[in-house]
Image (cartoon, rainbow, N blue to C red):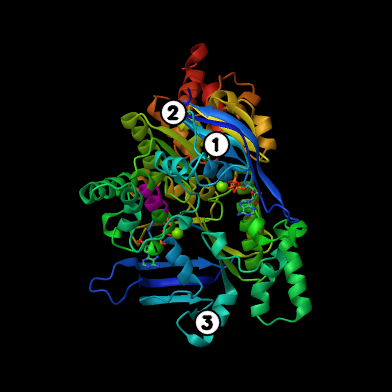
Amino acid sequence: MPLLEVQNISFGYGHHTPFEVQAVKDISFAIEKGECVAVIGHTGSGKSTLMQMLNGLLKPESGQVLLNGENIYQNKKTAAKARFQVGLCFQYPEYQLFAETCAEDIAFGPKNMGLSPEEIRKRVLLASEIVGLPADKLDVSPFDLSGGQKRRCAIAGVIAMQPEILILDEPTAGLDPAGREEILSMIGRYRKDRGATVLIVTHSMETAAAIADRILVMNGGRLVLSGSPEEIFSESEALLEMGLDIPSFARIILALRSRGVELPSAYTLKDAARVLSDGLRGGGRL
Amino acid sequence: MEQKDLISFQNVYYAYEEEAEEPAYALKNVTFSVKEGEFLFILGHNGSGKSTVAKLANGLLLPTSGVVTVDGADTKDENAQMDVRKKVGVVFQNPDNQIVASIVEEDVAFGPENLCLPREEIRARVDEALRSVDMTEKRHAETYRLSGGQKQRVAIAGVIAMRPKCIVFDEPTAMLDPKGRRAVLHTIRDLNTRFGITVILITHFMEEAAQADRILVLNDAEIALEGRPREVFSEYELLLSCGLELPDTAKLGKALQESGVPFPDGILSPDEFLEAYMRLRKDH
Ligand SMILES: Nc1ncnc2c1ncn2[C@@H]1O[C@H](COP(=O)(O)OP(=O)(O)OP(=O)(O)O)[C@@H](O)[C@H]1O
Ligand SMILES: Nc1ncnc2c1ncn2[C@@H]1O[C@H](COP(=O)(O)OP(=O)(O)OP(=O)(O)O)[C@@H](O)[C@H]1O
Ligand SMILES: [Mg+2]
Ligand SMILES: [Mg+2]
């Protein structure tokens, strides 16, 4: 049985108004325990709406979300339980941060889980260290943080709950390059240490290629492609048509191929460097 | 021809809480200037002070000490404040904070209306601004229903309609899909090259900065580095210590060098990369 299974879910905004939008249209997929799945799609394709339906926040208008085989929208209790098991970090941290200080903000989830004060303290410190929020910001209001610091604080609040499934909506947007690397390696460690499952929404094709076992592609509210990074990024024309792209490293390889250089595909920095250096050594070139 | 300075920061310090016993400075002894017509990028780690520079540049914040001037006028001079706001427009980090009206064209008209311009002039500016960001078709749309990328363009149009001499863009592409990113960058470059608007662009994408006239790197509230892209990106170790990186193309070049390939230094653009690689193939 998959850990999380989505069956034919749909959701629309502004029903019975002239501005009705069907944001998510009849989507189904399943995620196994321990998987890391990236969701990509043009702006407005329904990614954030879909994510909110996975953790008990937004009830699908039709279809079901099954966590360990149980419908999370069965009743209030199952929906509340899902919120602890599935930690969702919002795209705009402003929508998530609300407490007087960052420390209280990060402690909010663990407090609601009924943990002891010592345990909560421990988790707040650990989580803020993991996301690289400077310690002197813990007693500061989250509204007095810089953009990237707000995002780090919001991610810490979700990590502190130590959820079984971690959903991050654009976790690296607004982060500096070092912060992007830190968050990505944090996700890797979190998966390894806890056997956790991760879903990440991103506009960065490089991030999706580097981190995901599988990529889901949304377009106009529908799930249009699902596959390994290799499978997805071999569809470069379809991706461009949907407002997406292939990773920058893969673009360089494609450009060299169009100049007649025979090279296998590569999508990440490491693979591209290997393919390109082999391309010079091969045929006795180096 | 020597261009004149449009914005200049002289020994600027800024503390959000001046009253504190040991005020934490968001900017420390920052001195730089921006020439008319220039395209300047500002890079720096989270919390390094970039957005604070943006807010000081149009007088929204005033320096704790030091001087900021716009077109020769001190931003602290109360008589100059209106003029400073007119000359320097800022597109803030989160477009949601910038959009004030519920209909697209009303939102774009908001700034010019505050300048107390005649109606026909406002109309003409709004139409032109919407055209330049390719949002004419959406002029009657409700702002809250726009996607992230569309909101970003409306926010840009709102600033363009003020006809400022300089626009500061604070991470304008952070929430955009690849196509939206390209389109917004293209619009911004057009504003600079076709309309001569001075641009200051804050970003965390090193690839974008590779096209700058000049780059300013902030680190812990201070200027760590300043120069042309080629100069700045040749300081690999220093950039890493500032929480930054090389553009992807240069990263790939570096990875090739590390695997023993005699790949040349200083490759920034994809085109340069292709040329360098093809040359290596020929040579061997
Ligand atoms: N609160 C809302 N009210 C009305 N329409 C909405 C609301 N939230 C989203 N929409 C619309 O629903 C559609 C899907 O939006 P959603 O935010 O899920 O897209 P997304 O893929 O996350 O986009 P982005 O990449 O810009 O974050 C869009 O057309 C959007 O305009
Ligand atoms: N309203 C505020 N009150 C108090 N401190 C603030 C406020 N806004 C920012 N700061 C602090 O000032 C410093 C500089 O912030 P600033 O927003 O300029 O950084 P930034 O370089 O734009 O960062 P980012 O890349 O995360 O957007 C940070 O330490 C931040 O926490
Ligand atoms: Mg979204
Ligand atoms: Mg900022």
A25 or B247, which lies in front? Answer: A25
Query: Nearer the viewer's eye, disc 2 or disc 3?
Result: 3
Q: Disc 2 beta carbon < 8 A from ligand 2? A: no
Instruction: Report the magenta stretch's main SS.
Output: helix
Whichever of callouts 2 and 3 sits on the residue coming sooner in the sequence is 3
Residue hosting label 3: B81
Residue A66 image position (x, y, % from top left): 51, 32
Mark 1 to mark 2: distance in Å? 30 Å
Residue B145 drawn above or below residue A177: below
Q: Which mark is residue B250?
A: none
Residue A237 drawn above or below residue B164: above
Residue B81 image position (x, y, % from top left): 52, 82
Query: Nearer the viewer's eye, disc 1 or disc 2?
Result: 1
A97 or B6, which lies in front? Answer: A97
Range shown magenta:
A151-157
Within the image, what quadrant is residue B11 found in?
Answer: bottom left
Residue hosting label 2: B256
Q: Is residue A19 left or right of residue A136?
A: right
Query: Nearer the viewer's eye, disc 3 or disc 1?
Result: 1
Mark 3 to mark 1: distance in Å? 46 Å
Mark 2 to mark 3: distance in Å? 52 Å
Residue B105 image position (x, y, % from top left): 72, 66
Could you classify mark 2 by the number of other residues whose Cα lies within 10 Å: few (under 14), some (14-19), or many (20 or more)?
many
Q: Which chain does the numbered disc 2 sit on? A: B
Could you classify mark 1 by the number of other residues whose Cα lies within 10 Å: few (under 14), some (14-19), or many (20 or more)?
many
Which amino acid, mark 1? Val
Residue hosting label 1: A39
Residue A109 drawn above or below residue B106: above
